[in-house]
Image (cartoon, grey):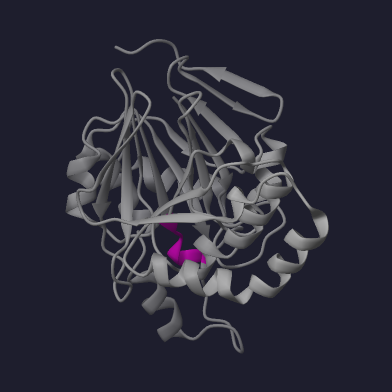
């Protein structure tokens, strides 16, 4: 199993950290995209994968930064030769969102279909399955389980557990401290978790008030808390993502998180890949081996 961060950013636009998205790759028939933030199709191509190859898209929740490039994924995969329907698993409301999105683009699609005369239009068909807490999905040898997390006032937000015979990866989605997620992540090889860096979010006239900062912080996991989450879950490795803000003091963040979690803490980057089978990390031209399991 390979876990690749495609986008490690947040709603703030950043050139280095694109919108939230990750890829779980367990080989043929099990390439799973998680979320569809801004720039996801470009990051997929940089990683050497096209939308044509994606077996399913899982949506953690319906916040704009996690779904904004959904139509781009659909239309670009068609241009890349996809010949099967899109499979999307998401929270309640996903079907309505997809129906409205495709209705919005219907005139443009009808024009393209009639004029371009491509061999298949199957990629423009979308099959939606709405998930609940505990929903289980299987792709190849990999089992996926949805875990409802705490992102109120957003309803129906989820994290996901990915398991094979020998590997376990967990993606938090957007959430504050969540006991159910901690339980689901117990002894995972890696926990990919969001983080809100409170001290790096100052009150700024014309941009954010003190109330804005506190309200946003209230439904995310603070840098002072995420280490506790990993420690209580007894995960092997903590990988951070969805950095808010996208620019921060890296050494300070590592120091804060490592106060509570004594295992490896990785500051996730776009296109960083963790290979659980080989116990290795790759990013750009760097590759690090972690050795074998204990």
> Does 97 appear in magenta?
no
197 inside magenta stretch: yes
Q: Looking at the image, which residue is at 45% across and 82% down?
A: 212
Residue 253 lies left or right of residue 249; in this view the side is left
The residue drawn where x is 51% and y is 75% is 100
In percent of width and height, residue 188 lies at: 29, 31
Q: Please provide the residue range marked out in magenta.
A: 195-200
Q: Is residue 7 left or right of residue 266?
A: right
In-front residue for pair 234/172 = 172
In terms of image quadrants, where is residue 231? top left
Residue at the right extreme, as displayed: 115
Looking at the picture, how far across and down is residue 294, in whole percent?
29, 12
Which percent across, then down, holds residue 215? 37, 78
Q: With respect to residue 283, does 243 lie above or below?
A: below
* Residue pictured at 63% horizontal, 59% vertical: 38
Q: Position of residue 44 (x, y in %)?
A: 65, 41
Residue 279 in sight here:
yes
Q: Is residue 44 above or below residue 27?
A: below
């Amino acid at each position: 199993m390979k876990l690749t961060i495609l986008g490690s950013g947040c709603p703030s636009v950043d050139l280095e950290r694109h919108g939230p998205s990750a890829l779980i790759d367990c080989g043929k028939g099990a390439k799973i995209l998680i979320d569809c933030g801004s720039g996801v199709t470009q990051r997929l191509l940089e990683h050497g994968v096209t939308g044509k190859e994606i077996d399913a898209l899982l949506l953690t929740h319906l916040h704009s930064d996690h779904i904004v490039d959904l139509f781009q994924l659909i239309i670009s995969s068609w241009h890349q030769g996809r010949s099967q329907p899109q499979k999307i698993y998401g929270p309640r409301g996903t079907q309505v969102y997809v129906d409205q999105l495709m209705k919005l683009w219907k005139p443009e699609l009808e024009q393209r279909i009639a004029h371009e005369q491509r061999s298949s239009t199957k990629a423009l068909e979308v099959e939606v399955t709405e998930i609940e807490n505990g929903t289980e999905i299987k792709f190849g040898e990999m089992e996926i389980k949805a875990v409802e997390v705490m992102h109120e006032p957003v309803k129906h937000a989820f994290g996901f557990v990915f398991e094979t015979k020998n590997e376990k990866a967990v993606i938090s989605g957007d959430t504050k401290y969540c006991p159910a997620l901690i339980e689901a992540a117990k002894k995972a090889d890696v926990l990919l978790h969001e983080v809100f860096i409170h001290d790096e979010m100052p009150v700024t006239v014309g941009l954010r008030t003190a109330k804005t900062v506190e309200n946003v912080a209230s439904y995310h996991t603070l840098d002072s808390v995420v280490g506790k989450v990993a420690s209580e879950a007894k995960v092997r490795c903590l990988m951070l993502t969805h950095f808010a803000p996208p620019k921060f003091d890296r050494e300070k963040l590592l120091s804060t998180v490592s106060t509570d979690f004594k295992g490896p803490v990785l500051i996730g980057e776009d296109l960083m890949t963790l290979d659980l089978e080989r116990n290795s990390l790759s990013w750009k031209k760097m590759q690090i081996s972690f050795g074998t399991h204990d």
